[in-house]
Amino acid sequence: MYTQLADWHGPGPWILLIPLVWIAVVVLVIAVLRRTLWRRHGCGFGPGLAAGAGAGTAAVAEHPLAVLGRRYAEGDIDAEEYRAKRAVLTEPPPRGEAGGGGAR
């Protein structure tokens, strides 16, 4: 029995493959999450990726009030039109209409 243990030379160089396999698994999981889930929720790495500035990403929809404010700041609309559209966007929905349904 002691001679069998004396002849054993250890696990060999293939034991280094186990950490490499785990590193590959971690890199693969991060790549998949970054490609799908994180981009969908706007949690990208680096500036501008969350706003859809990366190549091949869909633009994130802006809030209507933000678009209206940007148009006013750029001079596309005047102050009177800005105030009128802002009033329409900020007024509460009527009580009788729950979900914007049409006339019956």
Image (tube, helix red, strand yellow):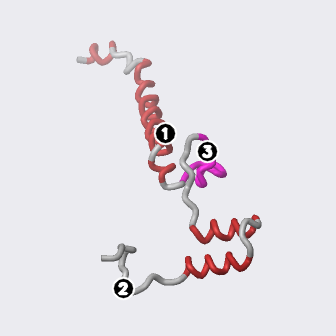
Find residue 31 and name its label.
1
Q: Position of residue 81 (x, y in %)?
A: 68, 76
**Amino acid type of the residue that numbered disc 2 sits on in the rendered structure:** Gly
What span is colored magenta in the figure?
43-55
Q: CA distance from mark 2 to mark 3?
A: 43 Å
What residue is rendered at 48% in x and 37% in y? 27
* Secondary structure mostly taken by the magenta-highlighted segment of the chain: loop
Could you classify mark 3 by the number of other residues whose Cα lies within 10 Å: few (under 14), some (14-19), or many (20 or more)? some
For marks 1 and 3, the one nearer the N-term is 1
* Label 1 with label 3: CB-CB less than 8 Å: no
Q: Position of residue 14 (x, y in %)?
A: 41, 20
Query: Which residue matches tag 3?
Result: 54
Q: CA distance from mark 2 to mark 1?
A: 48 Å
Q: Residue extending furthest front?
A: 104
**Dot 1: what SS?**
helix
Name the residue nearer the viewer: 68 or 56: 68
Q: Position of residue 24 (x, y in %)?
A: 45, 32
Is 64 drawn above or below residue 38 in the view shown? below
Query: Which residue matches tag 2?
Result: 96
For marks 2 and 3, the one nearer the N-term is 3
Q: Quadrant of the N terminus?
A: top left
Q: Quadrant of the C terminus?
A: bottom left
Is 86 drawn above or below residue 63 in the view shown? below
